[in-house]
Image (cartoon, rainbow, N blue to C red):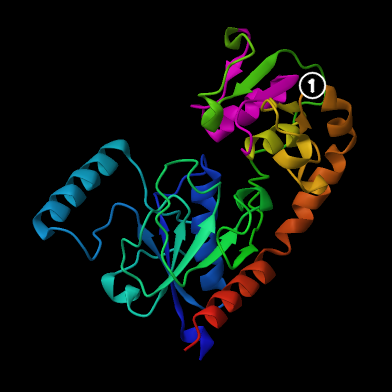
Amino acid sequence: MDKDRKFVIWAPSYTERAGGVMVLHYLCHYLNSIGYRSTIWHSDMLTRSGNSWQRKVLYLLKKVNRIRKGIKRTSASLNTPIASHDDLNEAIVVYPETISGNPLRASKVVRWFLHRPGYHNTRTNYGDNERYFYYQVVFNYPPNKYHPCSEFRFSVLLENTFKQTNFGERKGTCFILRKGRNREIQHNLSDGIIIDHLTNEEISEVFNKSEYCISYDMYTFYSKYAALCGCKSIVVPEAGLEKTVWQPREEFRYGVAYGEEDLPWALATRSQMISNMRAGQSNNLPSVRAFAKECIDFFRD
């Protein structure tokens, strides 16, 4: 039976500060919700390869560091059990695009491109007979290099945290650097607040006080959160990168300006952005069902 198929999701510790990490954990949760056995293989857990003594030392060091920092592997609100080695047997293993090779030595490998392969590291050592998915089409780059490749996405809004509470006067600018921190900075950052290291609650408060939010990270969801909170949300364009290349699908651009000159259009489409984001959540489980079916059909004996 197809529902007997197991999924193992490779993921770092749960955090709501990293969209890619969050959707990996939600994928595990949703797969369990629709009847599959799905578990999280935490990225600091022992793999099936390597020197046993060295692996154990590395594992213990990471465990101590995790305890010291108070980091939790999973979220109490999600059904995301931690995988055991037995869970790996005949499982479909889902890696994000950042994982090079096949550290779990799985026979059935799926790669989910949550950013462009090679963006976070230069190693993209992918294997044969793997199934590829991208979160949005711009992450399928270069086009057709990884085949077959399909879009797979769902929405995690955190709308209880990111919502507009200030409908009055706003002042100042806040900045998002994150994955764009190495870009050429065109603004005086001392004129505003950099939100990168704040908690989500603190970020929401800043978004509700600020008139503008300027992001050097081209693809962070925080730009949309800023718009949700009533900010004038602007992504700093990359030289030579046209708006339709930055984000080919118009509906994904709603509410966020690509450069200051795009701001009137972004403000005019903000309500459509909010409607689309809310409507998208109702399609989460159907999207995960379709994803699971495509994976199972691809690896069907």
Choose top left, top right, bottom left or bottom right for residue 200: top right
Residue at 75 percent across and 19 percent down: it is 211
Highlighted range, magenta: 191-220
**Image-based side of 194 in relation to 159, left or right:** left
In x, y percent, where is residue 214? 68, 23
Can you say whether 231 is above or below 253 in the image? above
In x, y percent, where is residue 84? 29, 69
Three-letter residue code for mark 1 = Glu
Q: Residues within 10 Å of mark 1 (few under 14, many from 20)?
A: some
Would you say residue 231 is visible in this rendering?
no
Residue at 63 percent across and 39 percent down: it is 219
User: Camera-side residue: 197 or 125?
Assistant: 125
User: Camera-side residue: 18 or 54?
Assistant: 54
Element under label 1?
helix
In x, y percent, where is residue 142? 60, 50
Can you say whether 192 is above or below 66 in the image? above
**Image-based side of 276 in relation to 163, left or right:** right
**Image-based side of 291 in relation to 253, left or right:** left
Can you say whether 240 is above or below 49 in the image? above
In x, y percent, where is residue 116? 55, 46
Q: Which residue is mark 1?
A: 260
